[in-house]
Amino acid sequence: MKKFLCKSFLFAAVFFIIDKLFYVFIHLSPNYQVDNRIELLLQGKINKDIIVLGSSRGAMNIIASQIEQETGQSAYNIAFPGSDVEFHNFILKTLLKYNKKPKTIIFSVDEPFELIPTTSITYRLDRLYPLVKYNYINQELINRGDRNFTSWFMCLSRLNKTNFTLERKPTRFDSILPCGSMPVNFKNPKLIMKYKYEIRPYSIARESLIKNTAYQSILKQCMVNNIQVVFAFSPNFAAHSSTFENRIRDLALNNSKFFVYDTTNSVYQNKLYFYDESHLNKMGATIFTRELSGFLNQMCKK
């Protein structure tokens, strides 16, 4: 029995030592991120008057540095392509936990999938994997069922294959400006677009309770912290859905503001200003952001 215990102890000691050697990958992973905005949040470095929240439409269609120039207020974009409202909720919680609260949140909503499940926008766990050295991130991964309690004391339990890729692999879409925005300045040569005049009805029955709860959590956090919420509806290469807009309005808090792009502007029916059917290119984003800045300036005068 004594011999067995000695061998067991020796094995455990060797395993413990080997496990700790993998800490180097945990420590180095953040250095190889293409997008370090979440780490900037964790480090308390995003302290701005105006924050842009959302997915790729927020990231690509709203240029925070232009808002700064046109409103005189500091601004930063923490919208993440491919992310859903649950992830937006986590990003806002992180912002408020480690940084000074902003005056205004520009909530860029995804028409029509803000509250409807789809594979195109999800909870971006992959954005968290490089940051597992932060206990806050590790706990979030545990909360999401992606890690278990052993990750609190075992390095290997915090790691996945992402952490072993010690090189940056940017794509053309990873052109992140210092203000956090990601406007697209190149064309999509394979895309053939035709403007859609038909307005599809919005189906409340398809909404997810989980996404709806996350949406309400965002609004409640803003209310508790006295943050003005501005819902931003950016254009698709299609007619604007008033039924989707009305649904967002119905669920919003009383003090929320709503900015809808100028639906009479023919630019938004011109494919030269779009990257694809759901996203503006840099030329289109500049025009949309200018309209948004004008709306924010009018808000300040009231």
Image (spheres, rainbow, N blue to C red):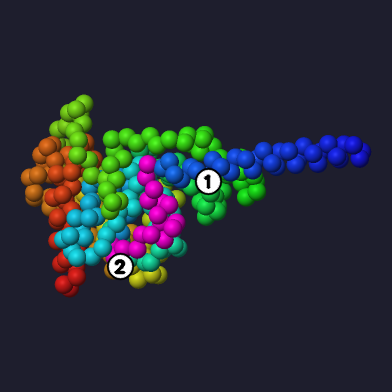
Q: Is residue 45 visible from the viewing direction of this image?
A: yes
Tell whether 154 sits left or right of 245.
right
Tell whether 15 sits left or right of 139.
right
Q: Nearer the viewer, residue 267 or 74?
A: 74
Quadrant of image for the C terminus: bottom left
Query: In the rendered structure, which amino acid carries the disc numbered 2?
Result: Lys
- Could you tell which of marks 2 and 1 lies nearer the N-terminus? 1
Location of mark 1 (residue): 27
Q: Residues within 10 Å of mark 2 (few under 14, many from 20)?
A: some
- Name the residue at 29% across, 38% down: 173
Marks 2 and 1 sit apart, C-alpha to C-alpha, by 34 Å
Above or below: residue 294 compared with residue 184: below
Location of mark 2 (residue): 103
Above or below: residue 297 compared with residue 242: below
Report x, y in % for residue 154.
64, 45
Report x, y in % for residue 299.
19, 68
The local secondary structure at tag 2 comes to loop
Residues in magenta? 34-50
Image depth: mark 2 or mark 1 in front: 1
